[in-house]
Amino acid sequence: MLSFLFWNLNRKPLAGLVRLLVDDHTPDILLLAECHIPLGELLVTINASSRYIYHIPRNPLQQLNPVGFPRILLLSRLPASAVRPLTGGNAEAAIFKVRPLGEADLLLVGLHLPSKLHLSASDQLQLATRIRPLIEAAERRAKHQRTLVIGDLNMDPFEQGVTSSEAFHAVMDRQLALRKSRQVKGEQRSFFYNPMWSRLGDGTSGPPGTYYKQASGPSANYWYTFDQVLIRPDLLSSFEDENLRVLTRAGAVPLVTGKGLPDSVTASDHLPIFFKL
């Protein structure tokens, strides 16, 4: 069983909290967005107390953001040969081939899409449509669709940039996803299953979302589920919904305030997600 942990650090020096999360959950793959911690410092901190040694796969194609850090940072405790970067990542995405010893390989797509602070929903949809061809090209080269997407999409599961057939085509219904694809205007479009739909609102086992923002305008959702996991149907036999959690603690340190909101002073304005396949 493979385990994954994703967290948007909001450009804050949270190496100590990352270490506590790693100690708690020992993910095989750790993905970080908005990580502005010097990489050497991050590795030393994480590995100082971990039962495992984490490393950053060498990626000569890696593109850095304007301040000199990768937009999506992947760390792994798997053998170096088990994780191979397939792209350096465009401005928003990086694709990796993950092949644990004795198991079939899968494609892992790490995402950090642009924020609503700078783009309209229409702009986000148009940018999301750029990612689908990248994923499909990687799947054709790999000759399979064992693909997993994880990251900060900066859109909720119900927005067109996530659900559209021309973008991620991610649906809330596992049985529907298991149909694998549908024909749209004469072309086949493959499905993703999006388990984050079931993490919306108070009826969930955790917080009502992964990000909170109080707006002054007429429209305010307050809670948003921007941090998501999307799973191709070919991997669904390995996934149980209870193996996906939105985390609210790192060791003994709460990541939420007394009111249950993301603690952006002590931690990040996003909550981490952890899941297993």
Image (spheres, rainbow, N blue to C red):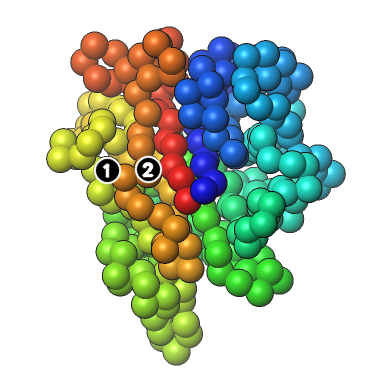
Residue 193 to residue 34: above or below = below
Amino acid found under the numbered disc labelled 2: Leu
Q: Quadrant of residue 175?
A: bottom left
Instruction: Tell me the SS state at disc 2.
Output: strand
Q: Which mark is residue 199?
A: 1
Tell me the residue that label 2 is attached to: 244
Q: Residues within 10 Å of mark 1 (few under 14, many from 20)?
A: many
Amino acid found under the numbered disc labelled 1: Arg
Residue 124 to residue 256: above or below = below
Q: Closer to the camera: disc 1 or disc 2?
A: 2
Instruction: Tell me the SS state at disc 1.
Output: helix
Q: Position of residue 209 (x, y in %)?
A: 29, 36
Q: Are marks 1 and 2 in contact (CB under 8 Å)?
A: yes
Q: Mark 1 and mark 2: span between their CA atoms?
A: 9 Å
Q: Quadrant of residue 60?
A: top right
The reply to whether residue 257 is visible in this rendering is yes
Residue 233 to residue 187: above or below = above
